[in-house]
Structures are given as structure tokens and as C-alpha cells.
Image: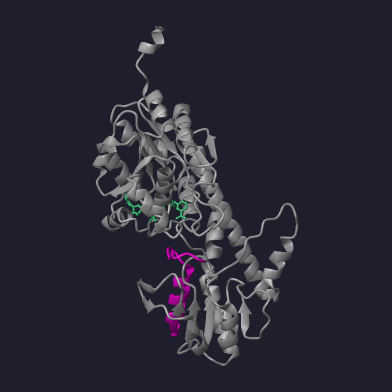
Amino acid sequence: MPETQFMPQTQSQTLAEKIRSRNARVGIVGLGYVGLPLAVEFAKAGFTVTGIDVSAEKVRRVNAGDSYVGDIPSAILAPLVEAGKLRATTDFGVVRELDTVNICVPTPLRKTKDPDMSYIVSACQEIALGFHAGLLVILESTTYPGTTDELVLPMLAKSGLAVGSDFFLCFSPERVDPGNPNYHTANIPKVVGGCTAACTEMGRLFYAQALEHVVPVNGTQVAEMVKLLENTFRMINIGLANEMALMCDRMRINVWEVIDAAATKPFGFMPFYPGPGLGGHCIPIDPFYLSWKTRQAGIEARFIELAGFINGQMPQFVVDKVQSALNEAAKPVKGSRIHVMGVAYKRDIEDMRESPALDVMLLLQRRGAILTYSDPYVPKIRVDGLDLTACPQEAAAAADCTVIVTDHTAFDYPALVARASLIVDTRNALKGVNSAKIVRL
Ligand SMILES: NC(=O)c1ccc[n+]([C@@H]2O[C@H](COP(=O)([O-])OP(=O)(O)OC[C@H]3O[C@@H](n4cnc5c(N)ncnc54)[C@H](O)[C@@H]3O)[C@@H](O)[C@H]2O)c1
């Protein structure tokens, strides 16, 4: 027999074989908008997946096959749970039995706009307790460049195991776009970069089993920076569109028509649109992870700060629009009934995180408006200063002014135009409709 047959397998060979044969036991830490779809994709690809979350309620719902993420119908989740391919737990003890762990926990900002790394740190502390040779760990939470190498690696390397040979560590940015009917976890190209070349290769091999296209890059910092470039690009271009809207407003030019006409250029232009302000867990937050890190390196991220300033003005601009529209009708905001259409941060989803609708509503309330709202995805709003229950869009008929903040496709826009007395449209939802009662951003 050839001598090589008696050589012990390396951790790398053993893990690669488990991944290729889909016998690797996959763990996903954090079962939210990112983690649950990822868990489902790997379960669909034939892996046995264990989701770990600190929320007992989410764990209970996953195990009941009851999805709470819009893009994952329960009809997809439930059969995977029933077949034993996917289960959830609050117990990190399962890490001892896992071969791979993806970390998909939140990365919010502190009030000071500094990164809040507490979720990543807490997840890694728990993972470290069950850490063992042969494990592949991939951080997916959006974060500043350097997090994987400078924060996560030292916590795992305390085990005495060597990265790249005993265990494997990567960063892979999540690019999921909730509510997007064309792109979802499986068909969005997956960028992955590891602490070593062997880590990158293990990460590539892992994702290639369940996702359509994997893009390996050299190192974790490149992968971390990819995500920040993408979201900063978006934030700054939205900032430019919003500044255009402010300028066009002053000059009485229809900004929507300008952007649509510019977008007919077949090269060198990509349309971005103005709106009531930024929302969601990514675009308003991620660029500040980058500016925080670059400040430490002595570089001020000026585009980011400027776009943040302009985007931050938009809720106030919307309220000023409402005020001047009501003034035309000789009504003050104080005591006026104002109906807000759409409060989720974007069209056709239920996510309220950082939604600009909340700022618009709080500002209107502060000026004495009497508020109502409709949103088919958000039955109640309970946040500091707002305690409201959704009503049917017919409530717009009784309002002095209706503000379209989020342009859900479920709204009946022709009926709205027929019944409302005054409409401030912050999304160009009423594109092509000519009526003196419509005021556009
Ligand atoms: N939502 C998006 O569209 C999106 C897109 C791309 C990237 N991201 C990034 O992905 C990450 C996750 O975002 P999300 O939208 O899925 O967040 P989410 O709040 O929907 O889900 C995070 C989950 O992690 C759980 N969790 C918190 N701390 C934990 C811990 N210590 N251990 C185990 N579970 C824990 C929470 O209970 C929650 O279920 C963030 O960094 C975010 O910036 C989000």
C-alpha cells in the first residue's frame, strides 16, 4: 500500500471532506433577517443546520416552523424543520458538535455613533467556550475593517489552536436585500476573505455548496471593506439625490423628472432617488463604522459626514413641505389631522428600524398635528413619543393632509387621489398623476 494512506488527515482535509459530502454540521448564530435565510439555504442544500439565538421566542417559532422573516415563507421553513434539517436553540453548548459557525448578530451604533461591538463580542465569548479544532467560523455581521483579525481572532486563538491549520476564520459580508423579489441569499454573489489563504479556500468551499456564486478575496479586511464601500456608495448617492431635491425645490424644478431623464443615458449614470430620509439597519449605520475606523487612522471620511448631514435633514424638509402645503390651504399644522401612508423604512416590508417615518411623525406631532397612519405591514407603533394603531387608508379622506412616506404597492393610489384633500408625496408614488392637490418632494 502507498505510504500516504497511513498519514493522518489534516483538519483542513477532514473539514473539506465533511463540507463536500454535506455532512458538516452547520451552525448559524443570530436568526434574524440575515441568519434565518442563510440557515434555510444550507438546510435546503442538504446540511443539518442548528440556529442559535438569544431570543427564546425566535427559537420557539423556528422550531414550530413559523417564520417571522418576510422573505422566508413558513411553507419553506416548516418542511425543513419537520425533516430534521433545521432546528434552533438558545444553548451555545451545541458549538462543541458543530463544524461551521456563521455569526449574523446585530451591529448597531451607540448613541455617540460609535460601533457597538457588544453583540459580536458576546457571541464570540459563547463560541469560545465550545471552540474546538476543525471549526470554520465566518463573521457575517457588517463591521469596520479589522474586526475579524483584531477582535474575533484573538478571542478564538486563546484556545491555543492555530488559525489556517487547526481552525479557519473568515469574514463574508451579507448583502441580502429584504423584500427584493429577484435577489435573495442563494443568488447574490457571496464575497469571502479569510485570515489565511487556507481559511479563504475553506470559506469558498463552504458557501459554494449552497450559494450560486462565491467571490473569494485576499484577506478579511478586503471582505469587510467591500460591504462598507457598497453601502457608503449608496448612502452618498442618496445624499446627492436628496441635495438635488433640495436644490430643485428652491428652483421649482421637478427633481423626479430630472433623474428619470438623466437615467436614459446608457452609460456613466445610475439613478438614485430622493426621499424622506434613510432607514433600515444598513445604509444609515454602516458608513459610520467606516468613518469611526478611518478617524483612528487620521483620515476624516468627509463624503460620509456630508451625506449623513444632508440625509438627516430630509424628515425636517418633509415636515416643512407639509407645513407650506397646509399654509396654502390657510391651515396651520397645529390641530390639523395628518395621515401618514407607509411607516416601514422601505416598500413592501415590515422593518421599522431607523425608519424616517418615525422622525417625520414625531416632528409633526411636536408641531401639534393630530396623527393617523396606514401600513399593511405595521399594525402598531409603540416607540418613545408615539403610540398609534394602523387604520385603513380610507382615513386619508378625513385628513387635512396625507403624507406618503413609504410607497407600499398594496396602497390604492387612485382611490387616495380621488378622496384625499391634500397629498405630500415623498416617493413619487403618484408619478404621472397631475392634480393640484399633490405636492411632490
Ligand atoms: N437586514 C439586512 O437587510 C442586512 C443586510 C446586510 C447585512 N446585514 C447585517 O447583518 C447583521 C445582522 O442583521 P439582521 O438584520 O439579521 O439583524 P436582526 O436583528 O434581524 O437579527 C439578529 C439576531 O441576532 C440575535 N442575537 C443578538 N445577540 C446575539 C447573541 N449574542 N447570540 C446569538 N444571537 C444573538 C437576535 O436575537 C436576532 O435574532 C448586522 O450586522 C447587519 O448590519 C443586515
- Residue 287: give x, y in percent of width and height: 50, 52
Classify residue 317 as left or right of residue 22. Answer: right
Q: Is residue 282 left or right of residue 102?
A: right
Which residue is at 31% across, 57% downward? 61
The magenta segment: 348-372
Tell me the quarter of the image containing the N terminus: top left
Instruction: Please indicate, yes or no, whether residue 342 appears anywhere in the rendered image.
Output: yes
Q: Residue at x 36, y 13 (%)?
A: 7
Q: How many marks?
A: 0
Seen at 55% across and 70% down, the residue is: 409
Q: Nearer the viewer, residue 285 or 393?
A: 393
Query: Residue 286 colored magenta?
Result: no
Image quarter of residue 84: top left
Q: Quadrant of the C terminus?
A: bottom right
Please, is residue 128 above or below residue 348 in the view?
A: above
Q: Nearer the viewer, residue 358 or 44?
A: 44
Q: Position of residue 384 (x, y in %)?
A: 35, 72
Please give the name of the residue rendered at 34% of the width and 34% of the height, measured from the top-left corner: 99
Residue 349 counted in the magenta span: yes
Q: Position of residue 421 (x, y in %)?
A: 57, 88
Residue 117 showing in the rendered view: no
In x, y percent, where is residue 439? 62, 80
Q: Using residue 230 as the reference point, say whether residue 353 is left or right of it.
A: left
According to the image, what is the colour scheme of the structure? one colour
Is 116 drawn above or below residue 371 in the view shown? above
Task: Return the residue found at the far bottom.
Answer: 330
Between 182 and 258, the residue placed more toward the observer is 182
Q: Is residue 71 above or below residue 14?
A: below
